[in-house]
Image (spheres, rainbow, N blue to C red):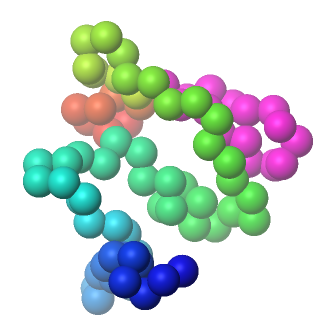
Amino acid sequence: VNPEWDKRVTNSNTNETSFPPLLPDEEVYLDVPAIARNKTYLAVGAIVVSPNQKYLAYSLDEKGGETCQLYVKNIESGE
């Protein structure tokens, strides 16, 4: 990775790495590096925001078998 492109930030208290927003007021709905942290493989399938902007549906392949699990996340609560 080109060091100029790598904008990761490390939290000194938890030693966790994250990426800051690219645009002003940008929100991260799905932190893929955090999800992948303790996995040997992770591929993101589809990501869709609901029409009312309250839910995020996404699919993940966590084993490399090209079979994805579907997840739904409440954007407001993060659950």
Picture quadrant where residue 68 is located: top right
* Magenta residues, start to end: 57-71
The answer to whether residue 14 is seen in the rendering is: no
Please state which of residues 43 and 14 is positioned toward the viewer in this rendering.
43
Q: Residue furthest left?
A: 24
Image position of 74 (left or right of 52):
right
x, y (%) of residue 50? 36, 16
Taking depth in this image into account, of 7 and 65 the one nearest to the observer is 7
The foreground one among 39 and 1 is: 1
User: In percent of the image, x 83 and y 48: which residue is there?
Assistant: 64
Classify residue 42 as left or right of residue 67: left
Q: Is residue 10 above or below residue 28?
A: below
* 7 in relation to 57, above or below: below
Q: What x and y, as percent, mark residue 35?
A: 54, 55
Q: Residue at x 57, y 67 (%)?
A: 37
Q: Is 41 a magenta residue?
A: no
Residue at screen point 69% across, 31% down: 69
- Quarter of the picture containing the N terminus is bottom right
Is residue 43 something that shows in the picture? Answer: yes
Which residue is located at x 40 percent, y 78 percent? Answer: 6
State which quarter of the image contains the C terminus: top left
Residue 18 image point, x, y percent: 37, 69
